[in-house]
Structure formats: structure tokens, C-alpha cells
Image (cartoon, helix red, strand yellow):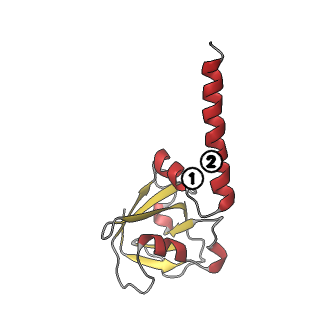
Amino acid sequence: MKINKVIELPLSDSAYSNPVVRLNNIHIGKGKIVRRTPLHIVNPANGQSTIRYAMGNGGTVKGLTKDAIAVDYDATVELGISFKDESVELEVKPASMVQSFVWLMNSPDVNVRLNTRLALIGFVLGVIGFFASFF
């Protein structure tokens, strides 16, 4: 999906522990993007990207058209854009499992980053233990 406008999320939606992107409700629902789906947002102009969780607009964001998204300040920094930009060209698509995992491993939220890394260590040790049981 192509996006041409970026709107600032309200402060109540902006947090490290709640990295969301608000889309017009035309994009959310069955057969479309499911709520809480990780979305990979790319700025083709500079190659920068970020991942945010998809949410609809419950009326909290004014001016959210079908060609616009609402993101937090940190997402604009990661994408190399500004809320003051009149028009931007962004590509939004569902994130792959690998993209989501890499993003979680490097999350700015320490709790998320630590839990993901501990899960990876547990998985690796479990695989090693499984194969060691055959010898």
C-alpha cells in the first residue's frame, strides 16, 4: 500500500511499549489488514524502515484518509521524515516473521528486547539439549 501523508499520533497512543500505526478503517478488517499485525513501513527515498503494529482509527486521529497513516515521533525519526513534510512516499506491507524478529531483538523497549533475546537463548539451548540426548 502506498502512503502519501503522515499524521502525528496523539500522545495517548505514543509509547515504546505500544508502537502502533493508525490506518484508515478502510484498510482494517477481514480480508484486509488484521488489527495488531506487524507492518513493515519503508521510505524508498532513503531506504530507512520501521515496524509498527496496525490499528484502525477509533476517531482519535483527525484527517486520517485512505492515503495517510498516523505514527509516533520515533517512527518518523526511524523513517527519516518529518510531520512537516507536505507529501511523502511510503510503502506499507505486512512484516515477515524474520523482519519482526529482528525488530524485536533490537527494540528500543528494554523489556521486549530482553525477553526476545532470552527466548532465543532458550530455543538454542533446547535444540542443543535435544541433539545431546542422542549421544
Mark 1, Cα crowd under 10 Å, few <14 / some 14-19 / many 20+, is some
Looking at the image, residue 17 sits to the left or right of residue 32; the answer is right
Residue 106 x %, y %: 55, 57
Task: Residue at 35%, 76% (x, y): give it.
Answer: 88
Looking at the image, residue 114 sits to the left or right of residue 29; the answer is right
Mark 1: secondary structure = helix
From the viewer's perspective, is residue 6 above or below residue 41? Answer: below
Residue 112 x %, y %: 65, 56
From the viewer's perspective, is residue 42 above or below residue 81? Answer: above
Mark 2, Cα crowd under 10 Å, few <14 / some 14-19 / many 20+, is some
Task: Residue at 57%, 66% (x, y): give it.
Answer: 20
Q: Amino acid at mark 2?
A: Arg
Looking at the image, residue 135 sits to the left or right of residue 101; the answer is right
Q: CA distance from mark 1 to mark 2?
A: 6 Å
Task: Residue at 58%, 56% (x, y): give it.
Answer: 36
Please state, as top left, top right, bottom left or bottom right, where the N terminus lies in the image.
bottom left
Looking at the image, residue 76 sits to the left or right of residue 46; the answer is right
Whether residue 3 appears in this view of the structure is yes
Q: Circles 1 and 2: CB distance less than 8 Å?
A: yes
Asked which quadrant contains residue 107, the reply is bottom right
Q: Amino acid at mark 1?
A: Met
Total tally of numbered discs in the picture: 2
Mark 2: secondary structure = helix
Task: Residue at 47%, 51% (x, y): give it.
Answer: 99
The residue under label 1 is 105
Residue 12 x %, y %: 66, 76
Where residue 117 is drawn, which disc sits there? 2
* Residue located farthest toward the top when viewing the structure as drawn: 135
Residue 122 x %, y %: 66, 37
Whether residue 72 appears in this view of the structure is no
Q: Earlier in the sequence, mark 1 or mark 2?
A: 1
